[in-house]
Every structure is written in C-alpha cells, then in structure tokens.
Amino acid sequence: MMARFCLYLFFLSVGVPVASLWAQTDTADTLRPGQNERPDKPKLIVETDQRFFYLKNADQPLLRNPVNVWGARVGLLLPVNIKVGVGYYFTNQSINEPWDEFDVSRRRLQYATVYIEPYFFRRRFWELSTLVEVGLGSARYDMLNRDTQQPVHRRTVAVPLSVGLSASVKLPVVFGIKPLRWFGVNFMAGYRYTLHEPVPLSESTLNGLFYSISPAIFLDRIYQDIGGWRKGRNRRKG
C-alpha cells in the first residue's frame, strides 16, 4: 500500500507537469518564417564537450591518431543570441616517440578557457554558430633519458587559441511529446593553435584540427517550456 501511495505522489509531482508540457502548444510554432529563436533574458547553459584533435606532426599525415580531449562548459545564452562563458579541458595521451635524447611515454594537457559563441541562425529545427576560445593551462611530458635510464618530467605553459564552426539539429515534437524538442545532435569542427615552448624540442606540436559529434540538450527550450507550464498553472489557480 505504501509503495502504491509513493508511486501516486511521484505521478502527481512529476508525471502531471510533464504531461501538461506535452499538451501545450509548441512555442516554436509561433515563429515567422526566417525568424530566429531567442531567450527573453540571459539563460544559464551547462554543456559537456568531448573533442577529437589531430595534433600536427611533421613526421605523420595530418589526419592520423586522433586524441580525445574531454571537457565541459558553463555560460550564459544572451537575448542577442550570443553565448559567453568558461570551460575546462584535459587529455592524457600515450606517446611512444623519440624526442632528442628522450623517449616520451605520455603527454598530459589541461587548460581553462573563456569563450564567445555568436549565433548566425537559431531556427526551429537547426542552428549555426561560430566559436572563439582563448585558454590558459599546462602541458606535462613523461619521458625517459636514454643515456641514464632515469625518468624525467617536464612541464610548460600552454595558451590555446581555438576557432570553430558549430551546427546543431533539433528534434521535432512527435505525437505531442513536447520534451523531444529539448534534444538534438551537435556537430563542431575547427582549428586550435597553441602558444607554448616544446619540451623537449620535437616535430610534434599541440596545434591541429578538431571535430566533435555529440548529443545536444537545449536548456533554453527547457526553461521556456517549464516557464510556460508554470504560467498556465498559475492562471488556472487564479
């Protein structure tokens, strides 16, 4: 009996609001052809961000041995359809290369960024933006001296500068299930140039092309739908 009662309370607190959202008119339906979606006030945006980098190396083809870079971003989506915020990224790359008198086994890169992302389009089913980032962090190298067989660790300051193009596809509302429009797929591609002192001197750099393909959650649409549901509930109570 207690389990049924708890399930009933859960339905009232969660199921009813979600069902109400499904039944509401899609706000995007009110947009005129060629009109962009835009928030009415700044909205908090939190995103995970996994990228695949092709680090430039004179001894290898450009698109070889992609490196996973993991990160996250926190920012604000402004009413002028510009997103600004900060991010943090890191990678832990295994390497087996001779550099000068060393054999390098691992490279660790971590850095924080500030970014600005103006949108060219924010339409009902898709959006297009450009990303500009400036970061500050460090690169650490784990090496072995061939002559002494002693492990050596070197660290250098890294200043990554990135520019990219981002495109997202948004899911439509199907069978009146409005929360589907909160989700989509994001595609991003660009180039990162990193100011740093190579340690030791080698042909390998931290520069290169990057891309990402990942699920997308449109928090501004969630805010919009929940706000509309609350307004409708208050009107019904009034």
Image (cartoon, grey):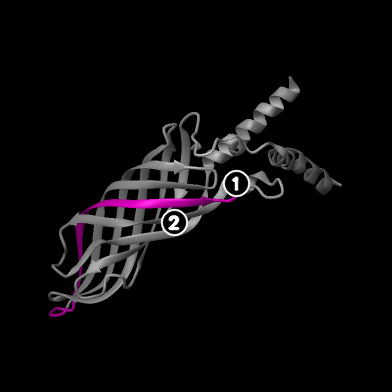
Residue 168 highlighted magenta (yes or no): yes
For the residue pair 227 and 199, the one nearer the viewer reads as 227
Residue 156 at what x, y percent from top left? Answer: 19, 57
Q: What's the magenta bit mostly, secondary-structure-wise?
A: strand
Name of the residue lying farthest toward the right: 1
Q: In the image, is 81 to the left or to the right of 174?
A: left
Q: Are marks 2 and 1 in contact (CB under 8 Å)?
A: no
Residue 201 place in picture, x, y as percent? 13, 67
Name the disc covering residue 187, or none: 2
Disc 1 residue type (three-letter): Arg
**For this view, does 24 lie left or right of residue 207?**
right
Residue 170 horizontal/vertical position (percent): 54, 49
The residue that mark 1 highlights is 181
What span is colored magenta in the figure?
146-172
Q: Residue at x 58, y 40 (%)?
A: 222
Q: CA distance from mark 2 to mark 1?
A: 17 Å
Q: Is residue 51 visible?
A: no
